[in-house]
Image: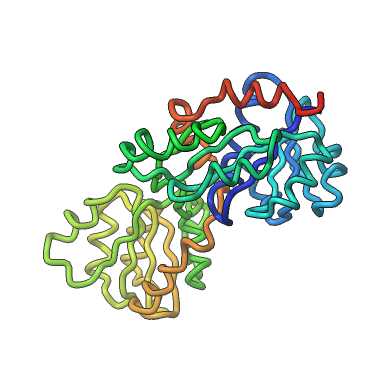
Amino acid sequence: MPALLITSVSPRQGKTAVAALLASRIASDGKSVGIATVDEGVVGPLSALLPGIAVRSGAPDAIRSAASEAGGDATIVEGLSGDVEGNRKIADELDARVIVVGELSDDLAGAALAYGDRAAGVIINNMPRYRSHELETTVRPAIEAAGVKFLGAIPEDRRLVTSTVRQISEHLGGRFTQWDEHSDELVDHVLLGGMVVDWGVHYFSSKENAVVMIRGDRPDIQMAALATPIKGLILTEGIEPLEYVHYEADQEEVPVTVVQAGTHDATARLETLLDTVQFDHPDKLARLQELAADTVDFEAIDEALALPVTG
């Protein structure tokens, strides 16, 4: 069974996203594919994200069994971050080629060369928008001069690191008062409602896909926010929405959550939200597919998958 092992130089650099991207592409070509992972925590998100694709987890020394259970014409293996020895054992066990995911500042050539002839190439993730000149004149030439295949650079994109209204509420310890069934859409921006100099409706309309956080005792600002197409309303200080705010939110079908913390403390807690983000939403996969269509060398990846090292 042909296999590709996806690893990363460091944790949280996108190996789960790349594994999902490649598995979805193989499936879209009419082939069956399975995913084996050493991280049990990604099984649920990947299974929900990729219906019809078996996702199995196992310890590094039992990954062959997990790959066998996943089945398919090909297997994508999400390996260990930064653990060359552990990944080499897995790759040898499955006769897999290895793709290394990292960021522009990483020594990707060195990371790939550590896998010897099992290295299929490298993918740069979260590629900074304004550093393409550095990529093309310095980083990519250095990777290729080292004899490592450059497989692409996926641009940085806000949508790939966003959370849903529900996830934001859970992170803040909130409780929904209404329309929690509409809380699973991704949020690109969080706006704070306070001493807004501009007209409230103008301010709250300034960002798309936004959730708004407002003190619970400011129904005037809450009503201004509800006059715009926001994705959710977070009320702080543990104060329930007044009846007319509740009615307006109900008419607009806007999820409302109440958190006990004050606005300042809740805002400070939002700074750690990024640490909890997972690749777990269909809109993230759709956006990644869009970004990768013109930036990732899928033909080279297909060739690597078709040519296992030992044959």
Q: Which quarter of the rendered picture does the N terminus lie within?
A: top right
Q: Which quarter of the rendered picture does the C terminus lie within?
A: top right
Relative to 142, is 243 above or below? below
Question: Seen in the image, is 54 located left or right of residue 130?
Answer: right
Q: Is residue 126 visible?
A: yes
Q: What's the residue at 70%, 36% (across, down)?
A: 76
Viewer-closest of 120 and 63: 120
Question: Seen in the image, is 158 located left or right of residue 65?
Answer: left
Viewer-closest of 96 and 268: 96
Point out residue 139 in the picture as x, y percentages from the top left corner.
Answer: 42, 40
Point out residue 298 in the picture as x, y percentages from the top left corner.
Answer: 56, 25
Point out residue 130 in the picture as x, y percentages from the top left corner.
Answer: 29, 43
Point out residue 241 in the picture as x, y percentages from the top left corner.
Answer: 37, 71
Q: What's the residue at 41%, 52% (across, down)?
A: 187
Q: What's the residue at 42%, 68% (across, down)?
A: 270
The way the protein has been coloured in the rendering is rainbow
Q: What's the residue at 53%, 51% (across, down)?
A: 13
Question: Seen in the image, is 62 located left or right of residue 132?
Answer: right
